[in-house]
Image: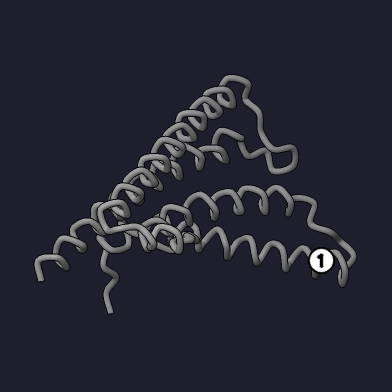
């Protein structure tokens, strides 16, 4: 079965999150084995665990918006009339977009600072600008996913009303 390149590209954030999770699991498991059974700890494991956790979180967040997988307590919102629910959902998306846009902007500032000072990790010497690239990228992807998911839900609701 051939791989659909468009679908793969549309889920690139999910693919990166899964790869990051796999690396995190392998490094953590390997670190435990090396430390407790071979008595030779992996001194670089913590650095890799840190950035893979960051990448998994931020790229997975975009996919979670796209698939509606974020935790939500809709019990109170469901008590309101449909028109009020739509307003609350719009305000919710607006707040999410504002917060994530601000985080994207701050992530850009962090990258500029890391490029300016040239800081890198102490053991593997991975530049911090590279590790922190996930902040603006992941936040921007989450904004796009949140907005497109909201638009998709609006279209789905309109189709349901017309039927």
Answer few, some or many: residues within 10 Å of disc 1's Cα (few below 14, many 20 plus, some between 14 and 19).
some
Q: Which of 153 and 49 is in front in this view?
A: 153
Q: In which quarter of the image is the N terminus?
A: bottom left
In the rendered image, the residue lying farthest to the right is: 39
Q: Which residue is drawn at 56% across and 25% down?
A: 115
Estimate the x, y position of residue 87 in percent, counting from the top left. Answer: 30, 47
Question: Percent position (x, y) of residue 124?
Answer: 69, 43
Q: In the shown orientation, is residue 147 left or right of residue 98?
A: left
Place residue 113 in its image quadrant. top right
| Image quarter in which the C terminus is found | bottom left
Q: How many marks?
A: 1
Is 54 in front, or is 87?
A: 87
Q: Quadrant of residue 118?
A: top right
Question: Which residue is pictured at 42% across the width and 53% down the height?
Answer: 62
Residue identified by numbered label 1: 34
**SS of the residue under disc 1:** helix
Q: In this view, does 126 lie to the left or right of 17?
A: right
Rendering coords of residue 10 (x, y %): 31, 57
Name the quadrant containing residue 12: bottom left
Q: Which residue is drawn at 81% across and 66% down?
A: 34
Residue that lies at the very extreme toward the top in this rendered image: 116
Q: Which residue extends farthest left?
A: 162
On screen, residue 134 above or below 111 = below
């Amino acid at each position: 079965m051939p791989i659909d390149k468009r679908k793969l590209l549309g889920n690139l954030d999910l693919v990166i999150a899964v790869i990051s999770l796999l690396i995190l699991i392998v490094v953590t498991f390997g670190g435990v084995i090396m430390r407790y059974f071979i008595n030779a700890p992996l001194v670089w494991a913590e650095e890799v665990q840190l950035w893979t956790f960051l990448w998994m979180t931020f790229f997975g967040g975009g996919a979670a918006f796209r698939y509606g997988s974020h935790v939500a307590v809709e019990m109170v919102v469901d008590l309101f009339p449909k028109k009020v629910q739509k307003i609350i959902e719009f305000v919710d998306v607006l707040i999410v977009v504002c917060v994530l846009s601000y985080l994207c902007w701050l992530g850009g500032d962090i990258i500029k600072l890391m490029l300016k000072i040239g800081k890198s990790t102490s053991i593997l010497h991975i530049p911090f600008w590279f590790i922190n690239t996930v902040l603006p990228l992941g936040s921007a992807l989450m904004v796009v996913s949140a907005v497109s998911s909201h638009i998709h839900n609006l279209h789905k609701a309109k189709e349901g009303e017309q039927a």
